[in-house]
Amino acid sequence: MTYTITLDRAACDGIFACLVRDDRFTEREDGLAGIEGEAADGPVSETATVTVSFDDDRLADAEQAAAACPVDAISVTEEGES
Ligand code: SF4
C-alpha cells in the first residue's frame, strides 16, 4: 500500500494528538510536529508543508493520526487518489 502523509506545519498547533496514534510523528525542537522520514535533522520552516510517502501496512495509523488532529493539519492520500 503506497500512500502519502502531508503535514501542514502552518496549521499545526503542537497539540500532539498525532504522536500517540502513529509514532512516525515526532515533536520537533520548534514545538511543532514532524514526520519520520523527512529531512529530520535539517531546519524545517514553521510554515512548511512536509510530505512523506510510505509503502507499508500502517495506513490505518496515519489515518487515525489525521482524524485525531484537532486542526486538520494532517492529510493522508492513497496512491491513485487525486
Ligand atoms: S495533532 Fe495536529 S496540531 Fe497536534 S501536533 Fe499533530 S499535526 Fe500538530
Image (cartoon, rainbow, N blue to C red):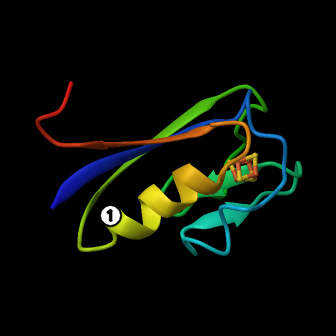
Give the residue at x 78% y 57%: 28
Can residue 39 be seen here?
A: no
- Residue drawn 58% across the image and 72% down it: 21
Report the side of 6 relative to 2 (left or right): right
Q: 62 and 50: which one is in front?
A: 62
Question: Residue 11, how many percent across, how many down?
Answer: 73, 30
- The residue beneath circle 1 is 59
Q: Nearer the viewer, residue 43 or 53?
A: 53
Question: Could you say which quadrant of the image residue 13 lies in?
Answer: top right
The quarter of the displayed image where residue 16 is located: bottom right
The kind of residue tagged 1 is Leu
Where's the C terminus, which quadrant? top left
The foreground one among 24 and 40 is 24
Q: Position of residue 10 (x, y in %)?
A: 74, 27
State whether residue 22 is above or below residue 32: below
For mark 1, give the secondary structure: helix
Please provide percent x and percent y for residue 53.
Answer: 32, 50
Tell me if the residue at label 1 has its CB under 8 Å from ligand 1: no
